[in-house]
Image: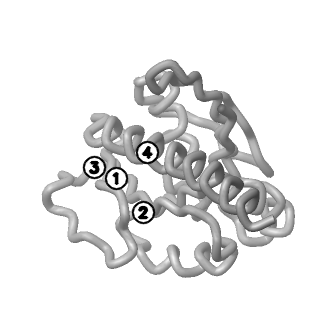
Amino acid sequence: MKHQVVFIGDSADGKTTLINRVRTGKFAPYVRTTIGCDFSSYVYNDGDTKHSTMFWDTCGRMEYISMIMPYIHKADLIVIVYDVAKPDSISGWLEYVPNESMVMIVLVIRDEKIDSIKRCEHMVADPINIITGENIESFENDMKRLLSKKVKDALRSSICALIMI
């Protein structure tokens, strides 16, 4: 199975660091600023099924939204990353997400303790401490579950389409 996951959010909110953490299991304290869009692959197995996932890491500047939109429209899953200090930034990014898209909203923190974070009304995943890796496994499991659901829904809708013809 092939999937495309697009990470969006403001500049310096932790998108690249989160992707590196998921792919390598390690914290990279110094990452370069993403210019335009960067990609990397992530492979995992779900039972006997091999999943090849392409992570699209977008720049966090609204001036480049027209360049980012094609990736957003092709995504199987959109991950909106935000900083605890800027929870209002979520709504700005949500307006560019197509209605039928699956979205995960993830809070990435660096210094704070996770249990001291107040949950945002939009948050759908546990906060992730990018330095310690706390809740990174939970994020990965949620992502895999949503991608698996997308595959099942697509199969179900194609079966329905065949029955209706």
> Which mark is on residue 111?
3
Q: Indicate which disc, 4 or 1, sits on the residue closer to the N terminus.
A: 1
Residue 29's label in the rendered image is: none
Q: Are marks 4 and 3 in contact (CB under 8 Å)?
A: no
Quarter containing the N terminus:
top right
Q: Residues within 10 Å of mark 2 (few under 14, many from 20)?
A: many
Residue 36 x %, y %:
80, 51
The local crowd at label 4, few if under 14, some if 14 to 19, many if 20 or more residues have their Cα within 10 Å, is few
Q: Is residue 157 above or below residue 25?
A: below
Q: Residue at point 51% right, 74% down? A: 90
Q: Which residue is mark 2?
A: 83
Name which quarter of the figure residue 133 lies in: top left
Disc 4/disc 3 C-alpha distance (Å): 28 Å
Q: Secondary structure at mark 1?
A: strand
Q: Residue at x 50, y 19 (%)?
A: 48
The residue pinned by badge 4 equals 145
Q: CA distance from mark 3 to mark 1?
A: 6 Å
Q: Secondary structure at mark 3?
A: loop
- The residue most toward the top is 48
Q: Quadrant of residue 124?
A: bottom left
Residue denoted by label 1: 109
Pointer 2 or 3: first along the chain: 2
| Residue 6 is at least partly visible in this image | no
The answer for how far apart the CA atoms under marks 2 and 4 are is 24 Å
Kind of residue indicated by mark 2: Asp
N-terminal of the pair, mark 1 or mark 2, is: 2
Q: CA distance from mark 1 to mark 2?
A: 6 Å
Horizontally, is 87 left or right of 156 in the view?
left
**Disc 3, disc 1: CB below 8 Å?**
yes
Instruction: State yes or no: discs 1 and 2 in contact (Cβ < 8 Å).
Output: yes
Query: What's the amino acid at mark 3?
Result: Asp
Q: Mark 4 or mark 3: name the one nearer the start of the chain.
A: 3
